[in-house]
Image (cartoon, grey):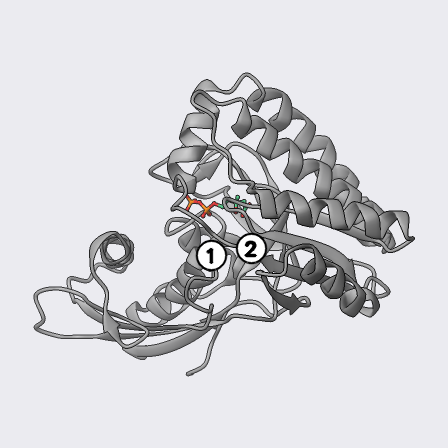
Amino acid sequence: HATDATAIAHPNIALIKYWGKSDERLFLPRTDSLSMTLDIFPTTTRVRLAPGADQDAVVFNGEPATGEAARRIAAFLDLVRERAGSVERAVVDTENTVPTGAGLASSASGFAALAVAAAAAYGLDGEPRALSRLARRGSGSASRSIFGDFAVWHAGTDDLSSYAEPVDAAAGLDPALVVAVVNAGPKEVSSRTAMRRTVDTSPLFEPWALSSKDDLVDMRAALSSGDLDAVGEIAERNALGMHATMLAARPAVRYMSPASLTVLDAVLQLRRDGIAAYVTMDAGPNVKVLCRRTDTDRVATAVRGAAPDSAVHIAGPGKGARLLTE
Ligand code: DP6
């Protein structure tokens, strides 16, 4: 096998959220989740084995990575080496195109690209399911970025049974996400910490996890029938429900900012005006608005009007992670 491999991956946005782990070491989630992979902000990662080196070298957008990011990548490579029966260190070179300060998580595209490149460089199984399980060990949501368009991540009960796979959607469904990057403000609680606190202390967590099962069933039906309004309604209730579980945690975790709420109001107004527009939000104040591709200009204008300081990005369904070298 090649000892030098480069892979590309894109972020994904969950329409049915992953929030809470049953096993933190294995990254086993409490619930199944479902996402759309985006066609913007790719991460490109090259992994080269470095015979004789005594530690991994990680370069992030041209700068040596340090601290938590470097530690997570080295831990991930240790897992790859353990599976490959290798002791060889690597040079990891990552280019991330998410604009700095955009407040959009890059762990999904980052670990999906790293998993694909590292598996190739160390000679591990390159089947999509094996790659999804591997990417999961870097960041749970990365398991879904292995696949393009829509993917469901089965929570599973152990390392083998927790993986993502593609979900079919009707050809007529023409979805887009208008991403409103609102003023990020002070650094938020990390999603890892917030998840743990929610599972441990929120009385709303179990009811949400239970209703999320129904949301997933309904979402699959909405996708296969190509019903964008249903897809949006289910995604919105699932995401707002997830934020409710956090608000009920002790102490509360609140990611919504005043600007987020202004955008939420603008989306309600769009709906009153007959536009299919629905929100989803993750571990930060940014708002992603799901709508028809043909409505993106109208939605983007409404979002800009509501939050003039925000940066607006438009995404459609994107491709899964893949090698750029063979
Ligand atoms: C709110 O995958 O970033 O975006 O597994 O701890 O790395 P770790 O968490 P991460 O969490 C994503 C949470 C979310 C919802 C989602 O993407 O499903």
Horizontal placement of 57 versus 207: left or right?
Answer: left
- Amino acid, disc 2: Val
Which of discs 1 and 2 lies nearer the camera? The answer is: 2
Horizontal placement of 316 versus 74: left or right?
Answer: right
Q: Which residue lies furthest to the bottom in this view?
A: 325
**Image height of 271 relative to 7, above or below:** above
**In the rendered image, which quarter is residue 234 located in?**
top right
Residue drawn at the location 35% of the way across and 77% of the way down: 5
Q: Do the residues labelled 1 and 2 touch (CB within 8 Å)?
A: yes
Horizontal placement of 300 versus 159: left or right?
Answer: right
Report x, y in % for residue 173: 82, 62
Residue drawn at the location 7% of the way across and 65% of the way down: 54
The residue where tag 2 is placed is 182
Task: Report the disc number at residue 237.
Answer: none
Residue drawn at the location 35% of the way across and 64% of the way down: 124
Report x, y in % for residue 199: 47, 25
